[in-house]
Amino acid sequence: MLRAGSLNRAVVIQKEIGEQDAAGQPVDAWVDVATAWANIAAKSGLEVAASDSQVSAARYSIRIRYRPGITAAMRVIHAGAVYGIQAVLHDEAGRQHTDLVCERLDTANG
């Protein structure tokens, strides 16, 4: 049983839509799909050098109530942070929760 008290962070799930600017160039546009209560847990972190900047990648598990229809093409927003969904793991047996394996990327010029 998924306890409501463990879902203590409000998150927004978004999907990308294809749009164009006035010049006809494609632009990244995201629209809200759902707002959900979640439990966010950091799983691991790593740092790699990418060209002249250092990239820190951290993996997170974001658990929400069971919600079919979420895909790895979507993203999660929480407190201004953007989490790209890497995998979607549905609790098909109990239909209690959906786990989103996510990655948050921060780039700092070094």
Image (cartoon, rainbow, N blue to C red):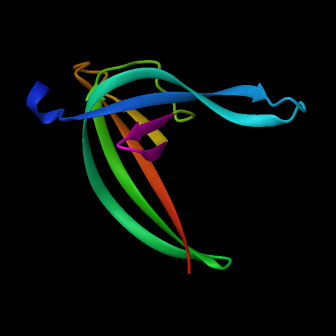
Report x, y in % for residue 71. Answer: 51, 29
**Residue 45 in the image: above or below residue 75:** below
- Decide if residue 107 is on the left or right side of residue 38: right
Residue 3 appearing in the image: no
Q: Is residue 81 left or right of residue 63?
A: right
The image quarter containing residue 10 is top left
The residue sitting at 31% across, 22% down in the picture is 92
- Number of numbered discs: 0
Q: Nearer the viewer, residue 68 or 55?
A: 55
Q: Residue furthest right?
A: 23
- For the residue pair 23 and 70, the one nearer the viewer reads as 23
Please name the residue shown 48% across and 41% down the image: 85
> Quadrant of the image for the N terminus?
top left
92 or 53, nearer to the observer: 53
Name the residue located 41 percent from the left edge and 45 percent from the top edge: 80
Q: Which residue corresponds to the image point at 53% horizontal and 75% vertical from the top-left?
A: 48
Q: Is residue 76 magenta?
A: yes
Q: Main secondary structure of the magenta part?
A: strand
Locate the C terminus by quadrant. Answer: bottom right
Whether residue 26 is visible: yes
Asked if residue 51 is positioned above or below residue 68 in the image, the reply reads below
Does the magenta segment cover residue 105?
no
Q: Where does the magenta region start and end?
A: 75-84
Quadrant position of residue 76: top left
In the picture shown, does residue 61 fall above or below 92?
A: below
The residue furthest front is 22
